[in-house]
């Protein structure tokens, strides 16, 4: 899990570190043209060395922080039909557009544990579908429709309430 996340974050860090490097290389090339006409290229070699050292510093394993936002989160299922007496759990998942959508379950769970302060569940009609407010386990009680609201408080101070529409049939 950490290896995949580390690889993803390292790739992002390398991409971002390459942008300033490319700009610096362009500036160095311009400087080299000026220096070629006036001085030796010894300065150019040392500036390339310091550039390589800077790139190495960015690849030392420092991982940028991964912070979930309310736009990364969704609930599954968003809509479900169940029978009376049947139960299931509502899960917190990454949206399809999220940069975290491809994480495997252990990586996702770790990311959530680091970024989510609290999760609570409540039913609009407990007589139709009850829900455990801590675990998110929903149980069909009688025929009808209920909305399960999942409220997520993030470590960054954001809060989001997501809905699941539950149809209970006989």
Image (spheres, helix red, strand yellow):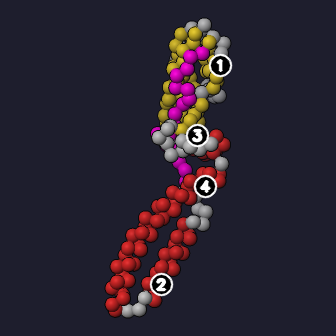
Callout 3: helix, strand or loop? strand
Distance from the alpha carbon under mark 2 to that under mark 4: 32 Å
Can you identify the residue that label 1 sits on?
87
- Above or below, 136 against 27 in this view is above
How dense is the environment of label 3, judged by Cα within 10 Å: few (below 14), some, or many (20 and up)?
some
Q: Rounded to the nearest whole Å, what is the CA distance between mark 4 and mark 3?
A: 23 Å
Q: Name which of mark 3 and mark 1 comes first in the sequence.
A: 1
Quarter of the picture holding the C terminus? top right
Q: Give the foreground label among 4 and 3.
A: 4
Q: Earlier in the sequence, mark 4 or mark 1?
A: 4
User: Looking at the image, is mark 2 or mark 4 earlier in the sequence?
Assistant: 4
Q: Is residue 76 magenta?
A: yes
Q: Specify few, some or many for label 4: CA neighbours under 10 Å numbering under 14, 14-19, or 20 or more.
A: some
Of badges 2 and 4, nearer the viewer stands 2
Choose mark 3 or mark 1, whichever is in front: 1
Q: Which residue, given by chain and number where applicable, does mark 4 sit on? A: 6
Q: Total of numbered circles in the picture?
A: 4
Mark pair 2, 1: CA separation: 68 Å
Q: Earlier in the sequence, mark 3 or mark 2?
A: 2
Residue 88, horizontal then vertical, whole percent: 64, 22
Residue at position x 59%, y 44% in the image: 103
Q: Are discs 2 and 4 less than 8 Å apart at CB?
A: no
Identify the mark at residue 45; answer none if there is no mark: 2
Residue at (54, 41) in percent of width and height: 101
User: Where is residue 134, by image quadrant?
Assistant: top right
Residue highlighted by disc 3: 117
Which residues are drawn in magenta? Answer: 65-82
For marks 4 and 3, the one nearer the N-term is: 4
Question: Percent x, y for residue 27?
Answer: 37, 75
Looking at the rendered structure, the secondary structure element under dot 4 is: helix
């Amino acid at each position: 899990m950490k290896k995949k996340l580390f690889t993803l974050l390292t790739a992002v860090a390398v991409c971002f570190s390459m942008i300033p490097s490319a700009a610096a290389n362009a500036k160095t090339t311009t400087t080299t043209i000026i220096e070629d006409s006036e001085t030796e290229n010894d300065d150019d070699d040392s500036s390339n060395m310091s550039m390589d050292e800077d790139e190495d510093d960015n690849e030392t394993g420092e991982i940028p922080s991964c912070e979930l936002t309310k736009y990364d989160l969704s609930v599954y299922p968003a809509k479900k039909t169940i029978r009376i007496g049947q139960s299931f759990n509502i899960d917190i998942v990454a949206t399809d557009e999220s940069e975290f959508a491809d994480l495997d379950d252990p990586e996702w769970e770790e990311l959530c544990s680091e970024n989510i302060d609290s999760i609570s569940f409540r039913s609009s009609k407990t007589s139709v579908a009850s829900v455990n407010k801590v675990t998110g386990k929903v149980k069909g009680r009688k025929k009808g429709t209920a909305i399960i609201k999942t409220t997520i408080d993030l470590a960054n101070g954001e809060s989001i309430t997501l809905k699941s529409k539950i149809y209970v049939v006989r």
